[in-house]
Image (cartoon, rainbow, N blue to C red):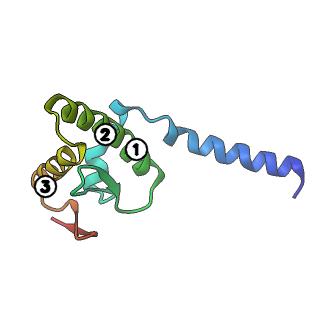
Amino acid sequence: MTRFARISALFIALCLSLPALGMGLDEAKGKLESAKTQGLIGETPTGYLETVKADSQAQAIVDAINKARRDEYARIAEKHDIAVTKVETVAGQKAIEKTPTGQYIQQDGNWVKK
């Protein structure tokens, strides 16, 4: 493969990945429910989202939402002088309880439809 071909391939790959890397929190929030309904994203007992099916846009949504959740969990833990893991666990339980029927949740490491 020539140097030009390698650089071109790298450039194309970078261009294709930019929309996923650039997703902001507001955009992620707007797309979250649809991705959950499509079965691409599910809630976990750890208080975070994970992708159920590999999809670059779903992963970008998960990354943006999880960053915001991580920041909020840290803020709550600091405010109440408790471990972040406790906040994550409680948030995970609540998120799973609130998940509508037909969407994915993680139980014992496996994805199941609620």
Which picture quadrant has residue 44? bottom left
Residue at image location 25% in from the left, 46% down from the top = 33
Question: Dot 3: few (<14), some (14–19), or many (≥20) neighbours within 10 Å?
Answer: some
Q: Mark 3 points at which residue?
A: 100
Question: Dot 2: few (<14), some (14–19), or many (≥20) neighbours within 10 Å?
Answer: some
Circles 1 and 2 in contact, beta carbons < 8 Å: no
Q: Name the residue under label 2.
A: 70
Q: Is residue 73 left or right of residue 90?
A: right
- Distance Cα–Cα, label 3 vs label 1: 22 Å
- Distance Cα–Cα, label 1 vs label 2: 10 Å
Q: Name the residue under label 1.
A: 63
**Which three-letter amino acid code belongs to the residue tagged 1?**
Asp
Q: Is mark 1 on a helix, strand or loop?
A: helix
- The count of marks equals 3
Choose between 113 and 85: the one closer to the eye: 85
Which x, y percent locates residue 7? 80, 45
Which x, y percent locates residue 67? 36, 38
Residue at image location 21% in from the left, 57% down from the top = 45
Closer to viewer: mark 1 or mark 2: 2
**Which three-letter amino acid code belongs to the residue tagged 2?**
Arg
Closer to viewer: mark 3 or mark 1: 1
Which picture quadrant has residue 37? bottom left
**Which three-letter amino acid code belongs to the residue tagged 3?**
Pro
Whether residue 100 can be seen here: yes
Which x, y percent locates residue 53? 39, 63
Of mark 3 and mark 1, the one earlier in the sequence is 1
Residue at image location 43% in from the left, 45% down from the top = 60
Of mark 2 and mark 3, the one earlier in the sequence is 2
Q: Is residue 83 left or right of residue 22?
A: left
